[in-house]
Image (cartoon, helix red, strand yellow):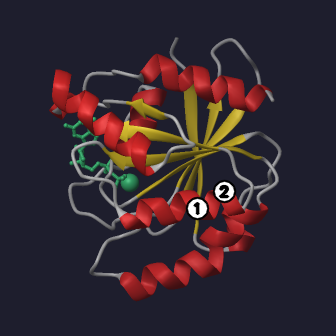
Amino acid sequence: MRVLSRFLCAATGVNQFPASALPEVAFLGRSNVGKSSVINSLLGTKIAKTSSTPGRTRSINFFEVRWPGKPQPELVFADLPGYGYAKVPKEVAASWSAFIEPYLKERKTLALCLALVDLNVPPQENDKQLLEFLDGAGRKALIVGTKADKLSGNTLRRALENFSHAAPHARVLPFSARTGHGRDELWQEIRAAIRE
Ligand SMILES: Nc1nc2c(ncn2[C@@H]2O[C@H](COP(=O)(O)OP(=O)(O)O)[C@@H](O)[C@H]2O)c(=O)[nH]1
Ligand SMILES: [Mg+2]
């Protein structure tokens, strides 16, 4: 099924968030992990800007999603700024406390947080911190392991095990924006979360 999507706005402050009426899914993870690529893969279009230069997205970018044949949008995707990019620590730290933390803690309609990790990179301390933060904020999180196409068989299995060890309470869903692997499963998770 092909969904229809529309860019809503890019927010760099709490007062720029769109009115929250629809259930929202947040895409989180280190810079370059593949957040925008996962969004584009799910939406079947290049609506979110991708870049091979880490640290490009400094705003929360909101996209509205509509099922074909339905008159109204049903949910919103939020593409968040990446963390862990060494060259901009101060700026990133400032934007976290200014609008990203408030978003994650207080956004009433936030139904699901997708914590993206690169399956080709060992579990990182800042990913663990994010999961702890989300847990503390009472947020439901699902780990999405990106760039699964770069691994095969045994190496993929081992990578998934490593992440399960690092985050024993969360499930890790392998995903590839390149091949579409995991796309249907991720849509199922999203639909289940917004129905709750
Ligand atoms: N092989 C592979 N590369 C990917 C995949 N997803 C993203 N990338 C690459 O990783 C880089 C960062 O992707 P992007 O979506 O912009 O990451 P973001 O910074 O988290 O939004 C780009 O060069 C993408 O082409 C994937 O599933 N497989
Ligand atoms: Mg991005």
Q: Position of residue 182 (x, y in %)?
A: 40, 22
At numbered mark 2, what does the secondary structure look like: helix, strand or loop?
Answer: helix
Q: Position of residue 76 (x, y in %)?
A: 66, 41
- Could you tell me which residue is drawn at 26 percent across and 52 percent down? 122
> Which one is in front, 37 or 119?
119
Q: Is residue 47 visible?
A: no
Q: Which quarter of the figure has residue 32?
A: bottom left
Q: Which mark is residue 26?
A: none
Which residue is disc 2 drawn over?
A: 135
Amino acid found under the numbered disc labelled 1: Glu
Which residue is disc 1 drawn over?
A: 132
Dot 1 beta carbon under 8 Å from ligand 1? no
Dot 2 beta carbon under 8 Å from ligand 1? no
Q: Is residue 15 above or below residue 28?
A: below
Q: Which quarter of the figure has residue 152?
A: top left
| Left or right of residue 78, residue 81 in this image | left
At numbered mark 1, what does the secondary structure look like: helix, strand or loop?
Answer: helix
